[in-house]
Image (cartoon, grey):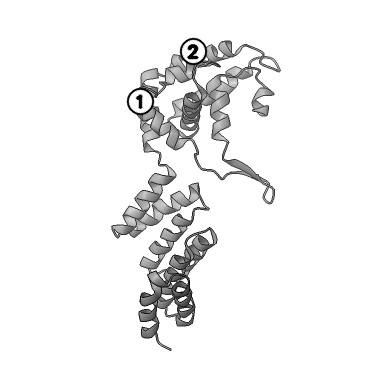
Amino acid sequence: LQYLYAHVSEPPLWMRDGFQAYFEGFAFDPATGEVRDEGGDPWLETAKNLRADASRALAVDAILSAVTGSWESARFYPHAWAFVAFLMRSENPAYQRFLWETCAVLEGSGPYNAESQQGNTDLVKGRFLRFIDAAKADADLTRWLQGQRTFAELLQDGVGAYNAGRYPDARSLLERALAVQGRDPMVNYYLGFVAYAEKDYRKADGHYLRARELGAEVSTVNWALGLNAYADKRYGEARGYLEAARSTNPSRYGEKADALLKSMPR
């Protein structure tokens, strides 16, 4: 916002709120000197829910027309995020060009744009409608938003693919979920399952240990680590993990761990 206000006194509301929401998940990494997206799309689920509700959805024309006070923030802010994210990520050159031209027309001819919010809003909206059909843009935005997957959807679909034995699909979906929420223990745990099913035992170890580090239930992860080490013929490690699972949760793993320990080569 500081950067935007350094050039434009009153930017269109969708641009102000949309870019503020879009960059919420970004953080500066002092080690690399880079700004990285670490939060995924925190407004995606809300935006999808609003868009699916005919009584709450805002058409593109309404988003472009909005000025301060037009809509309650809880309704407009996610829509503004969705519109900006759509423009930023669309492969349609018309939308890419509009976003670039918005910055150009707001720059104006002087060192600073001191026009009113209404004036800048009308200017940008007029530019949009001159080249893009509003109804088509509304349909394109809806279609694009429906195609985006929330973290919960990626996790659910990844687990479903794993349970169905579609391991490459499961890995792809879970890795996408991991990119959204890298510190979620469940994603790491199921990625361990996938690696185990594909007999990549060392990778499974890494995911299980990461899940445990992030707070997954200790006895459950130790049991998975024990099975993984056993399958990889690392019997010493397997014994340690299985004994740990048995001691921390004897009611669940006591008998199963005993049976597996007895069958294990010395």
Q: Evaluate whether residue 24 shows in this view.
A: yes
Q: Residue furthest front?
A: 251
Which of 161/108 is in front? 161
Residue type, label 1: Ala
Do the residues bearing badges 2 and 1 touch, measured as CB atoms within 8 Å? no
Quarter holding the N terminus?
Answer: top right
Which class describes the residues within 10 Å of circle 2: few (<14), some (14-19), or many (20+)? some
Q: Residue furthest left?
A: 164
Query: Tag 2, which secondary structure?
Result: helix
Residue drawn 46% across the image and 68% down it: 219
Which of 123/208 is in front? 208
> Mark 2 or mark 1, which has the lower sequence index?
2
What's the mark number on residue 139?
1
Q: Quadrant of residue 101?
A: top right
| Residue annotated with mark 2 | 126
**Drawn side of residue 87 relative to residue 162, left or right:** right
In the displayed structure, 145 sits above or below 40; it is above
Residue type, label 2: Gly
Residue drawn 45% across the image and 49% down it: 177
Q: Evaluate whether residue 91 shows in this view.
A: no
In the displayed structure, 173 sits above or below 68; it is below
Which of 37/133 is in front? 37
Q: Quadrant of residue 93?
A: top left
**Drawn side of residue 28 relative to residue 250, left or right:** right
Quarter holding the C terminus?
Answer: bottom left
The Cα atoms of the two marked residues, 2 and 1, are separated by: 19 Å
Query: Tag 1, which secondary structure?
Result: helix
2 vs 1, front mark? 1
Q: Tell me residue 252's x, y (percent).
A: 38, 69
Q: Tell me residue 54's x, y (percent).
A: 34, 24
